[in-house]
Image (tube, rainbow, N blue to C red):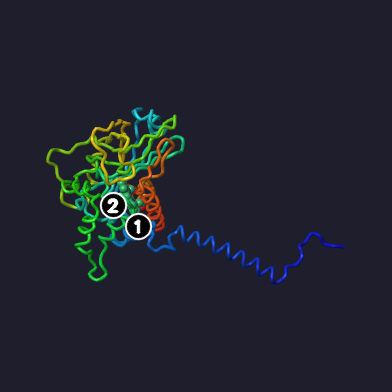
Amino acid sequence: MVDRSSPPPLSAASLTLRLAGIAVVIAVVAGAFAYVNGTLDPQRLTPKKLINVLETNNGVHPGFRRNHSKGVCVIGHFESSGEARSYSTAQVFNAARTPVVGRFALPAGNPYAPDSAVPIRSLALRFNQANGQQWRTGMNSMPVFPVGTPEAFYQLQQAQSPLPSTGKPDPAAVPAFFGSHPEAGPFLAWIKTAKPSASYVTETYNSVNAFYLVNAAGQRQAVRWSMVPQAVDAPGATAPEGSDFLEKDLDQRIAAGPLRFQLNITLANPGDPVNDASKAWPEGRKVLNAGTLVLEKSQPQLNGECRDINYDPLVLPAGIEGSDDPLLAARSAGYATSYLRRTSEVSQLPAAKQEAQQ
Ligand code: HEM
């Protein structure tokens, strides 16, 4: 009787051929991964390179963000005015209230930098919509970014890297970079007069990158947004000397009552640059007052709710879309790399060490 249940035995030659076929498939897949990963092209800018250069310049502070490392968490909610409703289906503009977890921070990667070190502050927000979708945004107090591409951002970081010979950055490198990057003009004009603020809550925070609002009819409107503070400083108030006045100021103000910001959404006119964060939009654009951010509580970042949030600017609800600004994709990929590194080091944070010793 013939056994039809098992295939005929393979000859040595056909077995070798099959194994070779499998090896070719594996090699092609590995090659594709290496290509996507940038391994095959050492010139290609990868998220790893972007984060490595930040670590070279700032040192590695385990558990902390690789940029905007020093910060504080805030908890509150957003009250929609309904004004953005006809431009976007996003629930955040339609529901009366949406809970928010936010974070104020200083730019740069040193969590122990004095608050007066730089005149820039940032505000990141995560809106948790009732339908489960989220809107995450990271905004800066600068109106425009120094550069328009991830490659230029990387070169600017490289210009600030310590030289192996001296252990210090080449003092001529940053001026040389700006000399060959005229797009930085608007940012340099702004930074010339910018002063470190005495408070996080008296600054205006800008999306800097452009996005699209999309309405129920599928119409897309290019926008940039800003959070404009209701709080004002006493006339002539300047940042005090010392390292950590911003968090103390925030704690004191919030203990006295909720702090409010108005969400202004600026609508682009046709032809306004949507893919270049180094360029301002001309004055006179229509601005929507989309609602009010109400901050009710602050928390230290070491154990606060914002600590383990990645404020990836491309986590968007239906009704808000990213633009083709190349910085957005680079931010999204770079923040993920920073997030993976820092969350794998959480046990090394000062707060975790203290808890372990108790
Ligand atoms: C290629 C350009 C950029 C790179 C490589 C970069 C890199 C980073 C990294 C690594 C972080 C820390 C992320 C984390 O660990 O969660 C960060 C935070 C941040 N970045 Fe950028 N960034 C870029 C451009 C921008 C731009 C254009 C803005 C404009 C608004 C911006 C605003 C922020 C803010 C607000 C935070 C703090 C977010 C938080 O509090 O968690 N960044 N950035």
Residue 130, picture quadrant: top left
Residue 236 in sight from this viewpoint: yes
Camera-nearest label, 2 or 1: 1
Asked if residue 217 is positioned above or below residue 189 in the image, the reply reads above
Residue 70: which numbered mark, if any? Answer: 2
> Which x, y percent locates residue 184?
24, 50
Mark 1 vs ligand 1: CB below 8 Å: yes
User: What is the secondary structure assignment of the residue under circle 2?
Assistant: loop
> Which x, y percent locates residue 189?
18, 47
Asked if residue 142 is positioned above or below residue 175 in the image, the reply reads above
Return the residue found at the far front.
271
- Judge by depth and name the residue closer to the eye, 240 or 59: 59
User: What is the secondary structure assignment of the residue under circle 1?
Assistant: helix
- Judge by depth and name the residue closer to the eye, 225 or 349: 225
For badge 1, the amino acid type reads Leu
The span from disc 2 to disc 1 (Cα, nearest Å) is 19 Å
Image quadrant in which the C terminus is located = bottom left
Residue visible at 40% across and 44% down? 314
For badge 2, the amino acid type reads Lys
Which residue carries the number 1 mark? 50
Return the residue found at the far right.
1
Residue visible at 38% across and 44% down? 324
> Which x, y percent locates residue 178?
22, 55
- Judge by depth and name the residue closer to the eye, 243 or 58: 58
Q: Give the mark nearer the N terminus: 2 vs 1.
A: 1
- Neighbour class for label 2 at 10 Å: few (<14), some, many (≥20)? many
